[in-house]
Each structure stands twice: as structure tokens, then as C-alpha cells.
Amino acid sequence: MWYKPDKNILGFQLCYKSGTHEKALTWLKDKGYSHDRIDDGEGKILTYKMTPILVPDGTFDKEQLLAIFKKEIGEIDPELKNLVYQKISEYPKQE
């Protein structure tokens, strides 16, 4: 969660694994949504691991993420849980 100085929520980023790739759903109050894959910086032989970065990932399965979220969320503030669940649910339909 990201907060403004006045303690209001600015946005959040939820990282999760889908198949063999880790992904991140980001929501910012003033910018909306982005969905990215996390490039872990691995994969080059005989080099040091690079810093993980977010790269565009157009595929997003809202229902899968809602199921993962419900199953894995654990004990957090109910208001935060409800906000994140609501924002996942409101993710714009992809065509």
C-alpha cells in the first residue's frame, strides 16, 4: 500500500505468481491500473543477476487473481482487504 502524507490511500501493488511467472497488479488512485510481469533478472549465462523490473504483460485473469487473493490473503485490516478485492473486481474488461 502507498499512502499520501494525510494517511489516505494513494494505491497498492499486489504481486502474485501465475504459472511460472510472477506478476504485479498496480492500482494508483490518480492513474488507474497496470498489470506487469516481473522480469527477475535471471537468464544470462556467466553474468551477475540483474535487478528485477516490471515489464508489460497484457494477459490478466481477474477471476484467477480474485481466487488467489481470497485463499492467500491471511489476516490484514478488513478495510484494506475489501479495497484491494474491490479494485481487482473493478479491473477493466479486456477485449
Image (tube, helix red, strand yellow):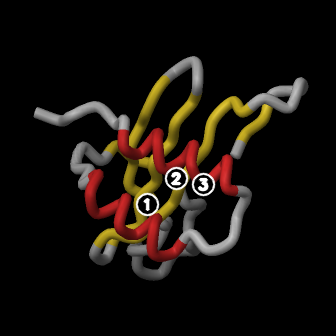
- What secondary structure is found at the residue carrying circle 3? helix
Residue at the image point whose x is 31% and y is 76% from the top: 20
Q: CA distance from mark 3 to mark 2?
A: 26 Å
Query: How many residues crowd mark 3 within 10 Å: few (<14), some (14–19), many (20+)?
Result: some
Q: Residue furthest front?
A: 78
Quarter of the image with the C terminus in it: top left
Residue at the image point whose x is 21% and y is 34% from the top: 93
Residue at the image point whose x is 39% and y is 48% from the top: 36
Side (left or right) of 7 relative to 19: right
Q: Nearer the viewer, mark 3 or mark 1?
A: 3
What label sits on residue 53 in the rendered view?
A: 2
Q: Of residues 55 and 89, which is closer to you in this image? A: 89
Q: CA distance from mark 3 to mark 1?
A: 27 Å
Q: CA distance from mark 1 to mark 2?
A: 5 Å
**Placement of 5 over or under 12, stated as above or below:** above
> In x, y percent, where is residue 25?
45, 48
- What secondary structure is found at the residue carrying circle 2? strand
- What secondary structure is found at the residue carrying circle 1? strand
Residue marked by disc 1: 39
Query: How many residues crowd mark 2 within 10 Å: few (<14), some (14–19), many (20+)?
Result: few
> In x, y percent, where is residue 78?
67, 55
Task: Identify which amino acid the numbered label 1 is placed on.
Answer: Asp
Task: Identify which amino acid the numbered label 3 is placed on.
Answer: Lys
